[in-house]
Amino acid sequence: MSQPTSDSVAVDFDHDQSPPPTVAPEDVVFRELCPAADVEEGVGKPFTVDGNHLAVYRYEDGFYACDNRCPHMGYPLSEGSVRDGVLICHWHHWEFDLKTGGCFLTNGDDVASFPVEVRDDVLFVGIPKGAREAARQRLVDRGMRTLEQGLKDRSTFLIAKAVTALRESGATPQEIVQHGLFYGAHKTNEGWSSGVAILTLCANLWDDIDAADHNLFLVHGLTQIANRTSGSSRRQRFPFPRSNEDPDLVTLKRWFRRYIDLRDRGAAERILLTLHDRGEPVETLADFVFTTATDFYFTGDGHALDFANKMFEGLDYVEWRGAHEILRPIVVDLVSRTRHEETSRWQDAVPVLDPVLARVDEIWAANQTADEKTLDVSAFAQVLLGDDFEPIVQQVEEELRAGVSPLAICRAMTYAGAVRTVRFHLKNEGDWHDVANIYSYAHGLYRAFQLAPSAELLRGLFHGAVFCTYLRWLNMPSARVPREGQRLPGEETFDSPEQMLTRLQEFADFQKVAEAEILVNQYLEEGHDITPLRHALAHIMLREDAELHMFQVLEAAFRHYDLSDDAEEKRIHMLAATRYITAQKVMKNILWSTENAERLQRGELLSDRDDDD
Ligand code: FES
């Protein structure tokens, strides 16, 4: 697979706000409104003409029409008032020139105005031909400006407004994700953040969530990007100059590993940019990054490798547009995250792992030349769930030498992560991230082996195997997993699968984790359609101000449910997602902002809310 080499800055962060072009008189069609006498001085009157919502005012000797939806938050301008030729919105007091629609607020959007004529005491309004298309383009432009502002201001509501307007006006999810990834990489000095990871997960899980939740998912990622970025840009870096003496890949890889080792971020970034500038295949860039992510023990609790994989998935999704910026933050993860051979917790693993890691080339060669051996994923997951890492490391090596695919071991490790999650006792509340880390890490490693398998990457298997044993304490005491045929207390019955999923939502709202698991277990046993269950679990997560690990767990569970043919494995993956998501204590600001923005987009009034919240 080769990577596109688009090096142009893919996102314009300084949108030009030039005035709309003048409409020629022959391009305007006049439509009858009402007798002029029906419009009282200073009292706005609403109309809808050819799908355009209008507010009409009589002021002094003239009549004036403008778009009825305030560009701020959609309040009807026909409910406003006019003072000294200034139209005032009564919700947040934005002010506009009644005649031109010009907004007096700095950075406030103008409101579109329409010509009005009086013919024989009857009002006619002039609607420009193509007004709806022009309105659509205005929405896209406004959406991009609003998104930019929301990201800078860290305003979830502005971001939600932008996302709903952009989606409504035909912007693709790919365009929005690309904008977010570029902004998230460009406007920070930190590493790969939870926000850009969530946006990539949004792209990956797009078909697993209900369409009604798509905006919400985008807003989650963009909000977290806003929280992790500042207004200032990352310092520019450039690839090496081209010459007849370009260093070869062996040299570049050696240099890259050395500079990561030395924690020299600038030098490593230039090498990565040079590979991209040369148009090297994706597999080559991935090999450099995955190798350095595993040069040290379980770098950053596995996040360096997991995020590197997310970066390549994200770049793939946006077709590598803006890659020269999106590639850079991962170097920060590679140089600055914890190298666990330096931690006291891993000191007992160093003498066991070092000799094994020193012979990975030999293990790889044996693996590649042996006949492929099938692995019983469930049985090997039980091996990985053992207490003592030394025999486990030995068995991983033996299976590899015998021809077992590293992908199969990754699947077993992911399944072990699911078991760790369903067996995680609620009393261990503070350590949820650890079980999510092994679950997501093992899935990331699986994806890394799909993209760029190598001897060096085998080290990730051994790191994961050791980490899995360190988590055994989190399953003591071990939580109960729903039994076959187990039903809710009181033998609660349901008329339909939909009713079961509504009940699941209620259990989640009250953090009734065990009840939620029993219900999902019953749903699976009864063989109901898996898609609505996926939608329901995703919705439960998206209703909260969810953090990255919830998204990661959901992806690992859904993908490995699909990969397995084993009913018990499938059950455990879905129970792991259920348990993790229903057990988290979180808030709901992102949900409410997105709902408000969507209501405004539909023309509903937030001021008229009839719900109880
Ligand atoms: S000022 Fe008009 S909706 Fe806020």
Image: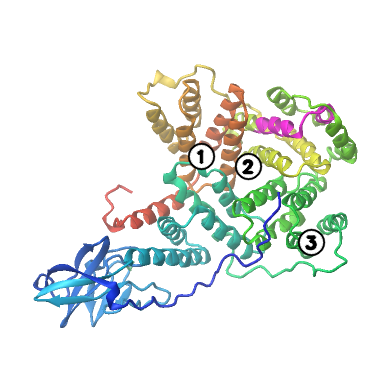
**Which kind of residue does numbered mark 2 sit on?**
His
Q: Is tag 1's residue or tag 3's residue first in the polypeptide sequence?
A: 1
| Element marked by disc 2 | helix
Given residues 340 and 528, the one toward you in this image is 528
Measured Cα–Cα span from mark 1 to mark 2: 23 Å
Measured Cα–Cα span from mark 1 to mark 3: 37 Å
Q: Is residue 487 above or below residue 358?
A: above
Could you say where residue 105 lies in the image, as x and y percent from the top left? 38, 76
Camera sees residue 425:
no
Task: Please name the predominant secondary structure of the magenta segment in the image.
Answer: helix
Q: Is tag 1's residue or tag 2's residue first in the polypeptide sequence?
A: 1
Q: Is residue 501 above or below residue 487?
A: below
Q: Are marks 1 and 3 in contact (CB under 8 Å)?
A: no
Measured Cα–Cα span from mark 2 to mark 3: 33 Å
**Which kind of residue does numbered mark 1 sit on?**
Asp
Q: Quadrant of residue 52?
A: bottom left
Highlighted magenta segment, given as a residue range? 394-417
Relative placement, left or right, of 116 versus 496 is left
Q: Is tag 2's residue or tag 3's residue first in the polypeptide sequence?
A: 3
Q: Quadrant of residue 68?
A: bottom left
Task: Give the numbered dot on residue 208.
Answer: 1
| Element marked by disc 3 | helix
| Element marked by disc 1 | helix
Query: What residue is at 74 percent from the left and 35 percent from the top?
Result: 470
Relative placement, left or right, of 2 versus 458 is left
Q: Are marks 1 and 2 in contact (CB under 8 Å)?
A: no
Q: Are marks 2 and 3 in contact (CB under 8 Å)?
A: no
Instruction: Kindly identify which residue carries mark 3.
Output: 271
